[in-house]
Image (tube, rainbow, N blue to C red):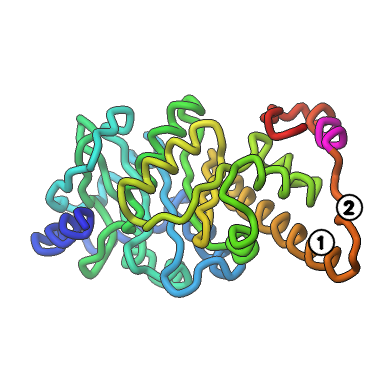
Amino acid sequence: MGFFDSAQEVLDKGVSAAKGAVSGVAVEQQAFVKQFVRMCEDGWRQGWHERNGGNASYRMSPEDVQSCKGFFYDTPSSWVPLASPLINLAGEKFLVTAAGSFMRNVPLDPVSNIGIVELDDQGVAWRIVWGFKGGGVPTSELPSHLMVHAVRKDVTIGADRVLYHAHPDNVVAMTGVLSADARAFTRALWKAMTECIIAVPKGVAALPWMVPGGTDIARATADAMIGRSACVWAQHGMFASAPTFDEAFGIVHAVEKAAGVWLKAQATARTLGVEPIEIPDEGLRAIATTYNLPIDDSMLD
């Protein structure tokens, strides 16, 4: 509830007008914004974003910030405190989807459905500096996004910048029949489709159902993604972290396809009264060797 209380304070105090009538146009024309918008639209077209489901964020590069800062609001919103300090994100700026926004509307009206927030120089608070037109605020999953960004920035030495949260049907369906266990999920996905181990060589983390939007699920997700670029939320969806928009979308796409193959194979095998045919562990090791993949060998027998 703290997030929404703080967000309401931002709304109450408001944000000043942007610098000039073309500020939104200028930011929207940036290459990274166009790629962000495309990812949101692609996810909607895949059917992964019912209603206002899902969200995304991007940790801006210094070049991105330089190209946009002349169009930030003259007076940003008030500062909103974070539940926990994120020292390694101090001063960073993030492009983020808006709370309650529909992914299908992001390409139609970016300035209303996305925005830029910055963290203060101590990493203890955030504020809006662009976008969220009409009184919007960042996604309620912002705590999860920022905590995961902090972890992935450290473990990838700054390489990962994109965090994408979607609700892919087959992944969610898998959580109805598999326990929320990283090894169980990883083995099922890897063995269902050759491409999956290539997309997620460290496997996928998996968390039991938790109430979204709070610090508990944020911390659990951040911990789970210390060593993995993907995390499944039971009965909810999944997160993917990557250096680029294509890679983040590709992780979700590959995992979702493998989940669909696994579900169909399991169902068909039961109907026919046979055991599903899967890629053997030695086959997975051969793929890892052939493609020089840094796999998590603990996922294999």
Task: Name the residue tied to disc 1.
Answer: 265
Q: Kindly check if marks 1 and 2 are in contact, taking CB atoms under 8 A apart as contact.
A: yes
Indicate whether 259 appears above or below 278. below
Residue 153 lies, in percent from the top left, at: 44, 31
Q: In the image shown, does 145 or 296 lie closer to the viewer?
A: 296
108 is higher (above) or lower (below) than 78: below
Magenta stretch containing residue 193, yes or no? no
Please state the horizontal and vertical placement of residue 131, each as a whole percent of the image. Answer: 28, 59
Residue wearing tag 2:
277
Marks 1 and 2, Cα distance to the nearest angstrom?
Answer: 8 Å
Q: Residue 69's quadrant in the figure?
A: top left
Quadrant (top left, top right, bottom left, bottom right) of the N terminus: bottom left
The residue range painted magenta reads: 281-287
Identity of the residue drawn at 20% across and 30% down: 122
Instruction: Please tell me how crowded label 2 is: few (under 14), some (14-19), or many (20+) other residues with Cα within 10 Å.
Output: few
Indicate the amino acid at tag 1. Answer: Ala
Q: Looking at the image, how many numbered discs can be counted on the residues?
A: 2
